[in-house]
Image (spheres, grey):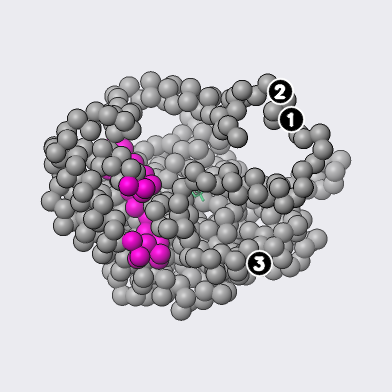
Amino acid sequence: MNNGKTLAIPEKGLPRDEVLELLRSFKEGDANYKDSKTWSLVYYLGEEHTRFLVDAFALFFSENALNPMAFKSLRRLEHEVVRMTAWLLNGDDSVVGVMTSGGTESCLLPVMTYRDMAMSKRSFRSGMPEMIAPESVHVAWEKAARYFGVKMVHVPLRSDLRVDVDAVKKRINRNTILIVGSAPSYPHGVIDPIAELGALAQEKGIPFHVDCCLGGFMLPFVERLGYEIPPFDFRVPGVTSISADVHKYGYSAKGASVLLYRNMDYLKHQFFVYENWPGGIFISPALLGTRPGGAIAAAWASIKALGMDGYLELARKVMETTAALQEGIRSIPELEVMSNPEMSVFAYTSNSKKVDIFAVGDQMEEKGWLVDRLQRPEALHAMVTPLHKRIVDQFILDLKQSVEKVRDNPSLARKGNAALYGMIARVPLRGMVKKEVLKMMEKLYGPEMIMPY
Ligand SMILES: *Cc1c(COP(=O)(O)O)cnc(C)c1O
């Protein structure tokens, strides 16, 4: 328990090396990404690249991109990252953009920007602004809808897990401020029909954002490797903005994403100016005030050092590893890969009533893997990185054994996490699920100390 003393600031400061030692010790129970046991969260290329990112980050550790006039170096680095990303995604010279703190910020901002743009042109006396997005769209867009008072209108997926364009069309009305598609979607790794959505958006005169947070620094290279990739970027005429995370397949340090608009007519609605603050005239291009220079410098450094040849080689390795993993999964009769994902993120599930996929997840966790669970429908998830190449055989072997164990012990589906996740995924009263999860969050963020020393 936090009795008000144990977690007070120490009366006398501790020696720095002792503090660092404590920090190191806290990592013990963490997800093991260095041995490629995780399937999300970390895009790790090994110690050499990591140390390079740390060096680049450290060079701009104290610098603040809040004021673009104070640190011209950061304005230059941000500008160059934006330009290189616009070029990579086939934007022309009128494409503009900003760097943000991550994918979430790059999804929040367009909702606010397009809302304000719409409101500058027409009134919304009859109902609130609405955005149309696939059910599979990243949860950051739900957050945006809530934060910015925009109604989220979901569109069901086709059987191939891509959004149904006719259903999008049916949901358009005069309050629609934005259509969103993913390239690819986070849950299933499939690309929505971007060309068709773009044509529809253009016909109706509605802004269209492609969430390329995952694909931005991957799909261009997968395409160059000769894989069949449908058009997903600024080549599609109706696309008005794209988000691409450098801290995912750009292999940069966390805290770096790029948000691009087709031209300044859109971006200008995102700018914030307050001219009457006693603290001075304040301008801000994105969500944050203070913006860490390190994340911008590390993103620039990662792109410059890897280069087209580096990214291409990494993409080749990732795609080969993805193919090997999927082949292994398909060789297990009870399992299947969902749909035909275009790149290196995919969902796999059970096609047998005898095998509960969440119970398989539990078994894999006992073997030291950290696998993410999907719901509606239930599945496991993989986001493949270059270093996963080392563990393909072990992973498939463990997966085979896990499936066999679950098949031979049906009661495992009613035990442990499988039972909990299964219950949460299947309860028809979603409001009840939300209430329970909110209670868990209150505990997690409550005043009690949850981690004993
Ligand atoms: C990761 C992701 C996001 C959110 O990005 P964060 O960096 O986690 O905030 C948004 N959209 C897609 C498609 C993503 O994969």
Give the residue drawn at x 66%, y 62%. Answer: 57
Of labels 1 and 3, earlier in sequence is 1
Mark 2 lies on residue: 4
Residue 26, quarter of picture? top right
Q: What whole-number distance in Å separates the C-alpha atoms at marks 3 and 2?
A: 39 Å
Give the residue drawn at x 71%, y 23%. Answer: 4
The reply to whether the C-beta atoms of the residues labelled 3 and 2 are less than 8 Å apart is: no
- Residue 183 horizontal/vertical position (percent): 38, 57
- Residue 236 horizontal/vertical position (percent): 40, 63
Which tag is nearer the camera, tag 3 or tag 2?
A: 2
Mark 1: amino acid:
Ala
- The magenta-colored residue range is 367-391
The reply to whether the C-beta atoms of the residues labelled 2 and 1 are less than 8 Å apart is: yes
Circle 2 residues within 10 Å: few <14, some 14–19, many ≥20 = few
Near-viewer residue (434 or 396):
396
Near-viewer residue (73 or 232):
73
Mark linked to residue 8? 1
Query: Would residue 181 be visible to someone looking at this image?
Result: no
Q: What whole-number distance in Å separates the C-alpha atoms at marks 2 and 1?
A: 7 Å
Give the residue drawn at x 60%, y 35%. Answer: 453
The secondary structure type at the circle numbered 1 is: loop
Mark 2: amino acid:
Gly
Mark 3: amino acid:
Asp
Near-viewer residue (291 or 324):
324
Instruction: Using residue 177 as the reference point, say whether residue 421 is left or right of it.
Output: left
Q: What whole-number distance in Å separates the C-alpha atoms at marks 1 and 3?
A: 33 Å
Mark linked to residue 55? 3
The reply to whether the C-beta atoms of the residues labelled 1 and 3 are less than 8 Å apart is: no
Residue 238, quarter of picture? bottom left
